[in-house]
Image: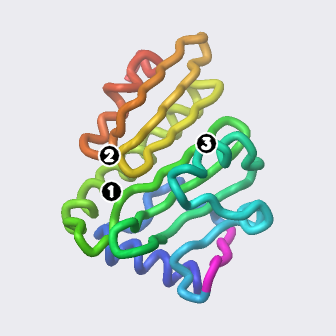
Amino acid sequence: MPMQLFVQTFHDRFGILPPEGMLPTDPLRPFDASAMLVGSEVAHAHGVALAQAEIGPFLRTAPEGYLLVGFWGHGVQSHAFYYVRVDAQSRVYFRLPHGGVYMDNERAAQRIRLFLTRYFAIEPVLRTRTTSFVAVDAMGEARYRLVGKDGTTVELDRSLLVDASFEERFAPVLPSL
């Protein structure tokens, strides 16, 4: 039931179902009774890093198999949608602003919908064309680093939330797209 509630909330807020590849086939367990923040068993064992200052240390220490996804916020303005995943090839940390009292949440939802749809459409290609990638986009701050199988490296310190121009920005490691 917690996963169904999460998926329904995702749909209600963003107008789409979670893109293919975003959620595992195994259910995730809620971190609280509201089921708006769910995670893998590895995430429950390792703990969460939800504040901006915790992202760097978290990415250096989070174990493979870590997956956290959902909605969380504190105060009236610092609310976000989270997608955090660590596997053998990638470290992904998305903290996308949505849900704050003073935010234009409709506009934020449109941006998140486009961002997630485009990201998860290109991620399978990244997996075949790179040896590793880091994708961090958190409340306007970002760091992307992709290492192509030929050694080509793409580094970007610019949020892609507004334009979701993944293909254009990652073109050096995606030459035949």
From the viewer's side, name the closer residue of 131 and 60. 60
Give the amino acid type for the residue marked by disc 3 in the picture.
Gly
Q: Which of marks 3 and 2 is nearer the N terminus?
A: 3
Q: Position of residue 86 (x, y in %)?
A: 67, 47
Determine the residue positioned at 38% across, 23% down: 177
| Mark 2: secondary structure | loop
State the quadrant of the N terminus: bottom right
From the viewer's side, name the closer residue of 104 and 166. 104
Q: Mark 1 points at which residue?
A: 112
Q: Mark 2 points at which residue?
A: 161
From the viewer's side, name the closer residue of 24 and 13. 13
The Cα–Cα distance between marks 3 and 1, rounded to whole angstroms, is 22 Å
Label pair 1/2, CB-CB below 8 angstroms: yes
Left or right: 63 in relation to 99: right
Give the amino acid type for the residue marked by disc 1 in the picture.
Ile
Q: Where is residue 75 in the image (x, y as percent from the top left)?
A: 41, 74
The Cα–Cα distance between marks 1 and 2, rounded to whole angstroms, is 7 Å
Give the amino acid type for the residue marked by disc 2 in the picture.
Leu
Magenta span: chief secondary structure: loop
